[in-house]
Image (tube, rainbow, N blue to C red):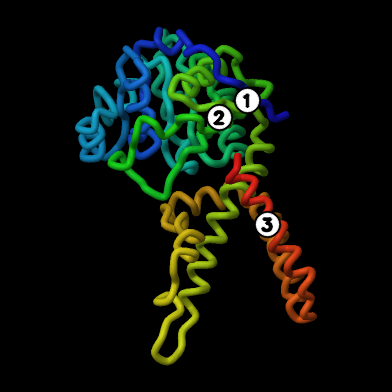
Amino acid sequence: MFTNQEPTIIPHQIQELQQITIWGVGLIGGSLGLALKKNGFQGKRIGLGRNVSRLENALQHDAVDYITTDIAEVVNISNLIVLCIPVTLVPTFTKAIIESIEPQQKRVVVTDVGSTKSVIVNSVEEQVKSSNSRAVAFVGGHPMAGSHETGVDAARAELFKDAKCLLTPTEDTDKDALQLVKDLWKFVGAVPYICTPEVHDLIIGAASHLPHLMASILTNTVTDITTQDKQALDFTATGFRDSTRIAAGSPELWTGIFLQNQDVIVGLIDGIVDNLHEFKDMLLKNDEQKIEGVLEAAQKIVMKQREE
């Protein structure tokens, strides 16, 4: 299942919310806060985090209206909590939310922006079930609008405009919560798509995770090529920079992503290795026709993407 939920009218459901908490006000969280305000959100945008100086910076950038490091302070007054944090922290932080819910608290919807989904969704849903808490409804989410830049200084209100946003409900996902999260991303300009966590991890593993891995390996490989007095790295130009730009992303963040999606990544690596061996064989056989065919096939795909 992989369906596109086309944006229609700006949802009134978001306008009715009094509090939206953004846990982690960096590039994604900061951009979300800016987009909410730009698009007319009238409620309070709360910035939650552990680093006071970063929170103060987010406040100065007008990404949020109020900042705090106290989970309990905001959990029980928020209608929606968006976890804009590394994938490895989502289960832990969701557990903290569940444990901070007061008995009389109305339901709070929790969603995330993580680049992996199966591990996160399975873990969080198990937490909700084991806690017997009906006050927390979780919806897995992933806006495809990241950047190699980090921090609220790089945030911008237009980041999500026309960006795909994958939502990964399961049979246990509350339908009203799913609708609210859809409305959130529509409100800030994104185009929601629905798929299972497993489909998400396969597609994004190929479309996002593998390119980052290849950019990092390419960078390290070229760096290792040296002669007595020269380095290959000193002679790289725009082609190298274009191919390796995304390798500038956070190593800590991407380590967590690769480990959480390791089954998919391992399979994709096997595919790359097979393709490289096949191309190596073409070179050794001086098979000009097949070599050109590989390059032409890739060229056509890239040109078609540019036209779209």
Mark 3 and mark 2 in contact? Answer it, CB < 8 Å: no
Mark 1 and mark 3 in contact? Answer it, CB < 8 Å: no
- Per the rendering, the mark at residue 169 is 1
Q: What residue is pinned by disc 3?
A: 298
Q: What residue is pinned by disc 2?
A: 140
Residue in view at x 43 percent, y 45 percent: 147
Residue in view at x 20 percent, y 32 percent: 60
Give how far across and how far down residue 165 sits, in percent.
54, 31
Question: Around disc 2, counting alpha carbons within 10 Å, would you say few (fewer than 14), some (14 to 19), or many (20 or more)?
Answer: many
- Please state which of residues 285 and 195 is positioned toward the viewer in this rendering: 285
Q: Which amino acid does label 2 sit on?
A: Gly
- Please state which of residues 21 and 225 is positioned toward the viewer in this rendering: 225
Residue 79 in view: yes
- Choose top left, top right, bottom left or bottom right for residue 71: top left
Figure check: 239 above or below 287:
above
Q: In this view, does 56 lie to the left or right of 244?
A: left
Identify the residue at the far bottom of this view.
Answer: 228
Question: Around disc 1, counting alpha carbons within 10 Å, would you say few (fewer than 14), some (14 to 19), or many (20 or more)?
Answer: many
Give how far across and how far down residue 128 sits, in percent.
55, 24
In what quadrant of the picture does the C terminus appear?
A: top right
Give how far across and how far down residue 212 sits, in percent.
53, 55
Residue in view at x 46 percent, y 84 percent: 226
Measure the C-alpha gap from mark 1 to mark 2. 6 Å
Q: Is residue 178 left or right of residue 16?
A: right
SS for dot 1: loop
Give how far across and how far down residue 228 sits, in percent.
42, 92
SS for dot 2: loop
- Total numbered labels: 3
Q: What residue type is labelled 3?
A: Ala
Q: Earlier in the sequence, mark 1 or mark 2?
A: 2
Measure the C-alpha gap from mark 1 to mark 3. 34 Å
Mark 1 and mark 2 in contact? Answer it, CB < 8 Å: yes
